Amino acid sequence: MKTIIDEMLEKPHSGDTNYTSKDFKPDVDVRWCAGCGAISVLSPAQRLMPELGIPKEKIVFISGIGCSGRFPYYMDTYGFHGIHGRALPIASGLKIARPDLSVWVVTGDGDNMSIGGNHFIHACRRNVDMNVLMFNNEVYSLTKGQYSPTSHRGQITKSSPLGALDDPFNPVALALGASATFVARGHDKDRAQLQQLLLKASQHKGFSFVEIYTNCRIFNDGAFDLYTNAESREDHTVWLEHDKPLVFGKNKNKGIKLEGFKPTIIDLTAGGNSINDVLVHNEKDSTLAFILANMTYSETLPRPMGTLQNLDERSSYEDRVVEQIQQEVETKGIGNLESLLLGGSFWEIK
Amino acid sequence: MDKLIEHLEEVTVRFAGDSGDGMQLIGTQFSDTAGFAGNEVNTFPDYPSEIRAPEGTLYGVSAFQVHFGSKNIHTSGDFVDVLVAMNAASLKVNLAHVREQGIIIVNAEGFDDRNLKLAGYAKNPLEDGSLAKFNVFPIEMNKELKKAFIEVDTPTKLVQKTRNIFALGITYWLFNRPLEATVNWINKKFKGKEDVIMANVHSLQGGWNFAEKHPDFRKQYIIDKSELPPGKYRSITGNQAVALGLVVAATKAHLPLFLGSYPITPATDILHAISGYKKYGVKHLQAEDEIAGITSAIGAAFGGSLAVTTTSGPGLSLKTEAIGLAIMTELPLIIVNVMRAGPSTGLPTKTEQSDLMQAMYGRHGEAPMPVLAAASSADCFDMTLEAARIALKYMTPVMLLTDGYIGQASEPWRIPEIDKLPEIAPHFAQDAATFKPYLRNPETLARQWAIPGMQGMEHRIGGLEKEDGSGVVSHDPMNHQKMVELRQRKVDGIANDIPDLEVMGEQEGDLLLLSWGSSYGAAKTAVEHLQAQGHNISYAHLRYLNPFPRNLGDVLHKFDRVVIPELNLGQLKNLIQAKYVKRVMGINKVQGKPFKAVELEEKLLKLISMRDIKKWPTNKKEDLPVDL
């Protein structure tokens, strides 16, 4: 059966798709606080859109609730501001119904790890093709400063004046554990690098999860300084890139070596260690991805940033849906509605 | 010996046994055959929530009731004329339903010491005379089966598996039914397994032959054909009818169908059916929970699908926040709630009409939503089409209420000709130059539906309040007042687009029985009986609950006394009293079971006899009506 949607999809886009980032800025004021990390994600996202080469009516941004939830209003594409925690199922329904669309989800550590946690793990395993940007500021900001599922133990917030008792989720490890195919981590202090990471996420066919450290100036200022500021990040993070050795430090003087399953730091300037001893990243290796993800809260190891995992052998859910329909039609023919209504047994009264 | 023949107008047969005895199966076959033979039919499956409860226990009894006859069959029958009981427990649980002098066919092998003990019988009821007022046929079914297969080489295990079919064969003899429909079904069901087909057909015929030859089976009962409108018929449950209605509605609207759902009794059959409709291009997601079920449907609706979520009570509670989102974003969405007895987990497999208030008001904020209720299994098809029509025309979520009774009960359905069903027109935006997401059709107040892929209409919507027209987020006080009122007016206005309430019987007078949802069958039957006895009583049935039909107030005020039967403590009654300032009497039942026609009839008779309160209602406190 040909639907109205099928007919619409047959119409070509009129005009070209040579956009600039301006084409994705709607005529509204950005209402995030001055200096908010989210603003530093918005501009790379707007600059990335022209690179996608997709007509902008085919792009949809979907959000939940929290400061991140405002994001769709600031992108001149189709957008849907959902309810708390539910951006992922809204996006899943849309993408399954409309595989032709480029679907983006913008969420936060509260929205995605707490109230939306169940949807998150299932979205990871289901592998619907969408790009999920999770703004992690390790605090609830829109409700004005309570601890979140990524707040560290002991964190002082309005709802934990004596320190939070929970241990935090490690979002990338959670995503890996739930079988997400693309898992990465970026931050708000290097826009060009973040734009590249988002591009990579968008090029991955399947579920792409990007955790983005976004600083909340008001309720958790400086939480990520060690890992994001230009002065300290070289020594405290290691950038993961496929086929590249895990070298870090201001002078590229340190490397990560695997001893068994245990990552350790080696000094490349001291005698006895060379670049050949350094672990080389393989983003297709799930076992390695777990080991690297678990460096996250280590007190001695650098924090892993960049692409932890990028698997491409698993087909996306919405493609499987289409394939199943096609297979059924091929083997049984297009459904005949009249015979469906007649069912297995009917009788006629004359 | 010649057999006697007696003609009957209607009969109720109940098949009862262990959960694993295949009672639902033979009940369905018996019902299909009755339809095939030209009768009106109505069925009621009654099964425990345990999947395979321990054998022989009282709580493991599964039953299937079939009411069939030549006319006016609107319920699954008040009293059982023929009970088939496969063991002691199923006799004990179901005996109270059986009419005096009713026929009881029992598998005598299910009355050994172990079974008697499990059923709590101190003595064997087949021997102690306690069944004297019934017509009991004890049959050693395994033994008789063995005899029937004596010349056929079939493994004993396979033979014994067909015991239920043997019992079915006996009941077919009793009503002189053709075996054809069931033989066809067996051939189709077990295609490729010749030994299984042979065993079942042989067993069915064996049951028939057993009764035919047995000296105790002396009388056959004939139920004449009904006078039904010509056409093709099939047996259909409410859940099947909803599933078919959804596929047809999507076709009529030229839209793809998307179902987001999570399994829950008694709504899951809809998910089962839809998930098998892949060759019709239907997409479905069995979501991780009820919330994902509805929110995925909302996502699909945003993308231009006819989007649906199906659930029952507890699931509906979980969906409420998302329903508010669909109301706020003014997206078309169908929510099917197959009601069950609550609150909380309640009685999962039992029926109730107690979600009406939740359907009407169960959301935070002013959140109006159209609510429809199907009257019977077959009516579920029509009301599903209505739900789709209203959702797409008015850009709104619509709740369709059915319940565990009509969801699972079946009745014959006259299969419609698809070409003759009306087209459904979605309210798509047409012109990018003038497009604004919340510009409204002045007549329906529906906003325009612009979906991703429509060039030049890129826009953002969501749960925040929007400015009318532009759809820009707005916290303006007067705009909020305007939008709240607009959403209400939009839903209220649907009253101009639905049929008036029809009254059966006198159009004004003393007494009106007003029912909704699945109480239709029992209520209508009760009034038909009373009217036939010459009593002055009228009847009306509501299928539209929000908004109500335009003429409902007029109808109510034309009667001195209005009675509303419902499977709750008076939810429709309260709504009607509040809206129309009309005192109403309730007949309320919350036992997990549908009304019997006879119980309504008795209560109405009592009311009819109370002439002294004819002036009722007054506003004096002591004169306020007491629920029956």
Image (cartoon, rainbow, N blue to C red):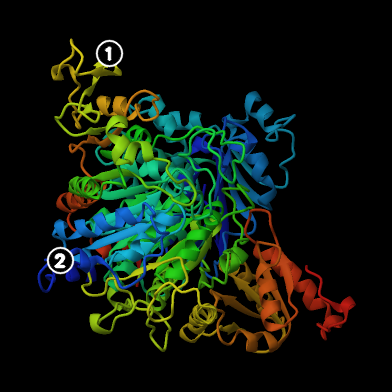
Left or right: residue A90 compared with residue A329: right
Amino acid type, mark 2:
Tyr
Q: Is B105 rendered above or below residue B249?
A: above
The residue positioned farthest toward the top in the image shown: A272
Q: Is residue B5 visible?
A: no
Label pair 1/2, CB-CB below 8 angstroms: no
Residue at coordinates 27% horizontally, 50% vertically from top-left?
A130
Q: Which residue is mark 2?
A: A19
**Which residue is the site of mark 1?**
A260
The kind of secondary structure element at disc 1 is loop
How many numbered discs, if any? Answer: 2
What residue appears at the point 29 percent right and 55 percent down from the top-left corner? A104
Whole-percent x and y of residue A291?
30, 24
Q: Chain of mark 1?
A: A
Considering only vertical position in the picture, is B595 above or below B423?
Answer: above
State which quadrant residue A67 falls in.
Answer: bottom left
Mark 1 neighbour density, 10 Å: few (under 14) some (14–19) many (20 or more): few
Q: What is the chain identity of the residue bearing mark 2?
A: A
Real-space CA distance between mark 1 and mark 2, rounded to the nearest whole angstrom? 49 Å
SS at circle 2: loop
Q: Are marks 1 and 2 on the same chain?
A: yes
